[in-house]
Amino acid sequence: MSTVSTSNRSTYHHGHLRPALIAAARALLDEGGPDSVGLREAARRVGVSPTATYRHFRDKDDLLASVAAEGFREFAAALAQAGREGQPLSAMGAAYVDFALARPGMFRLMFSPLIAKREAYPELREAADEAFAVLRRGVQSQAPQGEGVEAAALAAWSLVHGLVHLILDGVLPKESAQVFKSAILAPPKGAPDFDRFTAPKR
């Protein structure tokens, strides 16, 4: 087993252990999904004792909440970038699908039962709320009057979230993901487009 030098241990002791543990947890997440992440294994990968992790995280869920918060911040940034395009909602829907398919472990963690307990984790709650706020602003940009924005944002979210899970769960083949994404987010001429579908009606 590899060992960690005294200098590395000293560095972790002086404030770098928390981000190192989060990075290790993300690697575990990528390798085996949320169930593979644990404080003991993250500590082993970083090269510190398991007890050292408790200076930064109360338990496994606390670590997972911090990882999920990072995911939501990256997710919000991807949605915001897509929202600057000419058809913001279609672009945001495509970015939603792309994010999930590129990081399935992170996506499953972000929308795991942990999200229902987000009030116990302020960092996670703030990051998740901001991601939804970005989507809501995208809907609102298509309906400045503000009427029915919340329901329209939920409709947009449900549409792409359902597609993602059908692909991740193997109901739809992953190799055809781009075809399904285009069919839903950019339907044939004459059919209602995603942006119009989600826009509230007066």
Image (cartoon, helix red, strand yellow):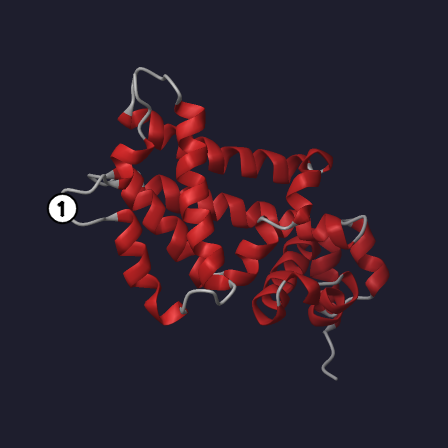
Foreground pick, 190 / 3: 190
The residue at the point 86 percent across, 60 percent down is 51
Foreground pick, 182 / 45: 182
Residue 134 visible in the displayed image: no
On screen, residue 1 above or below 110? below
Amino acid, disc 1: Lys
**Residue extending farthest right:** 51
The quarter of the rendered structure image containing the N terminus is: bottom right
**Residue extending farthest bottom:** 1
Foreground pick, 130 / 169: 169
Crowd around label 1: few <14 · some 14–19 · many ≥20 (10 Å):
few
Callout 1: helix, strand or loop?
Answer: loop
On screen, residue 141 above or below 14? above
The residue at the point 60 percent across, 61 percent down is 26
Q: Quadrant of residue 183?
A: bottom left
Residue 143 visible in the displayed image: yes
**64 relative to 143 in the view: left or right:** right
**Residue extending farthest left:** 189
